[in-house]
Structure formats: C-alpha cells, structure tokens
Image: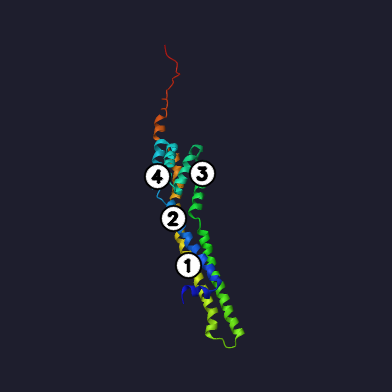
Amino acid sequence: MNLLDLARAAGPLLWVLLLLSIYVVYLPVMRVLALNRLGQDAGTLIERARALTAESGAASALREVDHAAHPSPAAGVLRAGLGRADRGAEAAQAAMNAAVLDGDARAYAGLSALGTAAQIAPLLGLLGTVIGMVRSFLVFSSTSAPTPAQLATGISEALINTAGGLIVAIIAYVARNALRAKADRVMAQAERVREELPAWLSGRPAAVVAARPAPMPEVALNFEPVKV
C-alpha cells in the first residue's frame, strides 16, 4: 500500500492533517529566516555606543546607531533610549520599554500559532480515530459475520488518523520550543541594553567635566578693630 492508498483509506480528516502539516513546516522555516536576521550580534555596536556616550554624549551615540541600521531588537532599544535621553531618565526608560515590547512581538511571532497547531493536531487525529471505529461497528450492525476486509477500512482509518495527528503535533512542539529558545537568545541582548543604558546616561562626559568652572577660593574676613 502506497501513500496515496493510505490517504484514501484514512478518510477526509487526513487531508486536513496534511494541510496542517504543510503549515507546521512552512511557518518554522520562515521564522528561522526572520530570527537569523534579528539575531545578528550587536555587541560591537553596543560597545561603540557606550564609548561614544561617555566621550561625546547621547547624540553622537544615536547618530552612530542610526548609521549602522542594525536590524536587531538590541539596536532598537539603543535607538529608543538614546533618542529620548535629552528628555530625562524616565522618558528614556519608557522608550526602551516600548522598544523591548516591539522586539518581543517580532521575535516571538508565530509561536502561539505553532502551539495551537500542536494542540489541534492530536484532536483531529482522535476525531478520525472515532470516525473509523464507528465505521467498523457499523459493519457489525449490518453484517452478522463480517470479514477482516470489511473491518479493515474503519480500523485503518482510525489508526492512520491517530498516527498523522501525533506526527504533526510532535513536529509543531519541537519547532515551537526551538524557535522560543532562539527568540530568547535574541531578546537577551535587548534586555541587557535596557538594563545598562541608564547607567551610561547617568555618567557625565569627560569634556563636560573639564569645562566646569573651578570653585571660587574662600576668603577669610577679619573685622577686629585696628589698634593705633
């Protein structure tokens, strides 16, 4: 029996499982491509922005980040925090929080769909199993002494649908966990930037410190009367 014969013996629910399996394979492939782009290492850019913030201020670091046009969420958090640095620490923190949420949406996109597919696939297989067993019992009700060939149709439908649902669910679960682990690594760098950037902004550049006017010397005044 070839695959086409198996599909015919399994009934219409197997075709639904086949369509679901195509989606379960297509979505992880597209997400891996997207995460590879988002997961480009931004360590060099982060260190460069740190140095420029200390030397020349947030504006120079922001120009460097904009010029790099890095696609990672870490670069997005850098851009958001440096862009609001002139409005105070609270504004910069709020902008970075929003950038992290945006990065989460991009990094974890599609994971909920894979989780749903992993839950639905066994249920579809179970439904096909029930339908196949019902067909087998209908043979008993219509024939006093059914032959193995007459029972085989319902039993094969039940078993094939069960196997198909489990296979699709396993693929979906494995792909979802692998993509989540990759997305966690991508967002870890963005979280690092969100935690470290306020400390960069709180430090004053050396040029500003050097330009600060020196304090006036204290002069002691003596108001005692002068003896003639």
Q: Secondary structure at mark 3?
A: helix
- Distance in Å between CA atoms under marks 2 and 1: 21 Å
Q: Secondary structure at mark 2?
A: helix
Q: Amino acid at mark 3?
A: Ala
Please identify, in this view, whether the residue under mark 2 or under mark 3 is nearer the observer. 2
Type of colouring? rainbow
Farthest residue in the bottom direction?
145
Classify 10 Å Cα crowding around label 3: few (below 14), some (14-19), many (20 and above). Answer: many
- Considering only order in the chain, which callout, 1 or 2, is on the residue closer to the N terminus? 2
Amino acid of disc 4: Leu
* Residue bearing the label numbered 3: 95
Tag 2 near tag 1, CB within 8 Å: no
Quote the CA–CA distance across marks 1 and 3.
Answer: 39 Å
- Residue at image mark 4: 45
Q: Amino acid at mark 2?
A: Leu
Query: In this rendering, would 18 be left or right of 45?
Result: right
